[in-house]
Image (tube, rainbow, N blue to C red):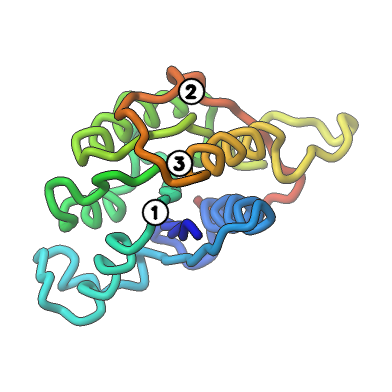
């Protein structure tokens, strides 16, 4: 059975990005796949910044990526780009560290305008690492920034667009037959809101 690793690139221990990562993980588990979760912030910072792949904890994290068939990558958007923490982790992966894997990119941020970071900043980096497929990207704005009014009522959680993206992701994982490398759906990153605020990115 295909295995999935969900990677959170948020530097905050209590983040909306982590909430979105957990929601995606639950949806993938519901589809019958085994999912592990990893927070990049829990890796040793000195080893990560020095690209010290001999460090036991960092080496273990890299092995988890290598062993997974599918990767969920979640990041907050800072200054129109994905987090520096996620960048540091991607930099220590081998040149083709996503070879043959199906990748689902997720992002959170303060405005739907930040959704472009998924396709113009993150996707090219992922594609350079030779994945089998980078699927439809999903952007979820932080609740406080979503512009939703209280009288509009509660917003669906998980967002329908996240469920749709996970469906595409698990379909691509499916029988584990070779997938022709490609860009996946064009950058129609979707925007959604969640009713409860109070967390950072």
- Vertical placement of residue 1 versus 170, above or below: below
Q: Earlier in the sequence, mark 1 or mark 2?
A: 1
Task: Estimate the x, y position of residue 4 in percent, counting from the top left.
Answer: 46, 57
Q: Residues within 10 Å of mark 3 (few under 14, many from 20)?
A: many
* Residue occupying the point 27% across, 75% down: 60
Give the CA separation, mark 3 to mark 2. 20 Å
Task: Estimate the x, y position of residue 6 in percent, counting from the top left.
Answer: 46, 57
Residue wearing tag 2: 113
> Mark 3 or 2, which is nearer the eye?
3
Residue wearing tag 3: 104
Residue 199 in sight from this viewpoint: no
Residue 50 in sight from this viewpoint: yes
Which label number is shown at residue 69? 1
Would residue 163 be found to the left or right of residue 94 on screen? right
Tags 3 and 2 touching, CB below 8 Å? no
Give the CA separation, mark 3 to mark 1. 12 Å
Q: Earlier in the sequence, mark 3 or mark 1?
A: 1
Q: Secondary structure at mark 2?
A: helix
Quarter of image, res 129: top left
């Amino acid at each position: 059975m295909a295995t999935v690793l969900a990677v959170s690139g948020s530097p905050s221990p209590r983040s909306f990005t982590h909430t979105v990562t957990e929601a995606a993980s639950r949806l993938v588990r519901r589809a019958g796949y085994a999912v592990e979760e990893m927070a990049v912030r829990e890796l040793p910072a000195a080893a990560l910044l020095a690209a010290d792949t001999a460090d036991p904890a960092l080496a273990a994290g890299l092995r988890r990526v290598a062993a997974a068939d599918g990767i969920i990558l979640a990041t907050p958007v800072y200054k129109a780009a994905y987090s520096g923490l996620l960048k540091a982790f991607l930099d220590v992966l081998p040149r083709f560290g996503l070879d043959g894997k199906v990748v689902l990119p997720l992002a959170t941020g303060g405005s739907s305008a930040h959704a472009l970071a998924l396709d113009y900043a993150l996707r090219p980096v992922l594609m350079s690492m030779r994945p089998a497929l980078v699927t439809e990207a999903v952007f979820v704005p932080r609740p406080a920034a979503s512009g939703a009014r209280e009288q509009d009522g509660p917003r669906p959680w998980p967002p329908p667009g996240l469920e749709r993206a996970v469906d595409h992701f698990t379909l691509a994982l499916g029988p584990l037959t070779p997938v022709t490398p490609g860009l996946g759906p064009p950058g129609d990153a979707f925007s959604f809101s969640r009713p409860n605020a109070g967390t950072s990115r």
